[in-house]
Every structure is written in structure tokens, then in C-alpha cells.
Amino acid sequence: TGFLTDRDRLVSDLENLLDGKADPVGCAARWKEQGAERCLRWLQGWLADLVRPSSGPRHNPGAQARLQTLKKRLHLKQLFLLADVLGRSRGSLGGTLDEQLLLEEVLICWTELQTTPTS
């Protein structure tokens, strides 16, 4: 599969997790198949796009509509907290921690983000 297809699947997982339509364990298993390092690196770019002003450069220029929709739902402070978790997780790659568990932790943190109600 191509990068854009993979990215769309990962974004769908993030959206479904926030909506309570997916579970972190199942998503982590799918993400592990694509490689934990690749997924965490991509997620860091996605978070960077979420916290940047709208006029800034983007890691995911083709996903503006989805980014804007998520950006309206999430609190900036919590995105920075998730970025810290993500940085620690990437630092743990290659160690003794199982990649599945590492991805589960990151995705559980994602599900715990406080969201504003969608209209």
C-alpha cells in the first residue's frame, strides 16, 4: 500500500478512537504491522500540524480538511502533553519494551484527550 493510503487508515483510527468507535489495542496491532517507528514518526508530524498556525508549513498538506476538523475538537495543551508521551515512546524504541504495548500506551493517551463536542 502507498503512503497516502496508510496515512488515511491511521487518521481514520485516530478519528474513530476519539469517537469511541475503535479500541487502542486493535489500532495498535494494525499500527505495529506498519512499523512502530514509522507510525510514531508520522504521528509526531500529524501532531505538529495540529499545533501549528493555519498558515505554517505542513507535514501532511493533503489532509487539511481532516486536520482542521480535529483541531477544532482538541485542546492545544493536551496535544503538547501527548507530544511529550510520543517523544518518550520514540526514545524507547529498540529497547526491551514491546512495540505493541508502546503503541497501545500512545493510543490510550490519544483516547484520553479532552475533546470539545462536535456539532
Image (spheres, rainbow, N blue to C red):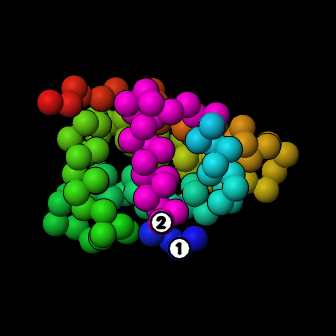
Q: Residue at x 34, y 26 (%)?
A: 114
User: Quick check: 114 left or right of 6?
Assistant: left
Q: Quadrant of residue 81?
A: top left
Confirm or deny contact between disc 1 and disc 2 (CB under 8 A): yes
Q: Position of residue 3 (x, y in %)?
A: 51, 71
Badge number at residue 104: none
Q: Position of residue 65 (x, y in %)?
A: 22, 57
Please rate how many residues cluster around mark 2, counting C-alpha atoms within 10 Å: few if below 14, some from 14 to 19, many from 20: few
Q: Residue at x 20, y 31 (%)?
A: 118
User: Considering the image in quadrants, where does the C terminus appear?
Assistant: top left
- Residue type, numbered disc 1: Gly
Choose between 11 and 113: the one closer to the eye.
11
**Magenta-tinted stretch:** 5-25
Q: Position of residue 104 (x, y in %)?
A: 63, 37
Q: Is residue 14 magenta?
A: yes
Q: Main secondary structure of the magenta part?
A: helix
Q: Quadrant of residue 1?
A: bottom right
Q: Residue at x 65, y 60 (%)?
A: 34
Q: Which residue is label 2 attached to?
A: 5
Give the structural element (helix, strand or loop) at label 1: loop
User: Quick check: 49 left or right of 28?
Assistant: left
Q: Which residue is label 1 attached to?
A: 2
Residue 91 visible somewhere in the drawing: no
- Residue type, numbered disc 2: Thr
Residue 8 visible somewhere in the drawing: yes
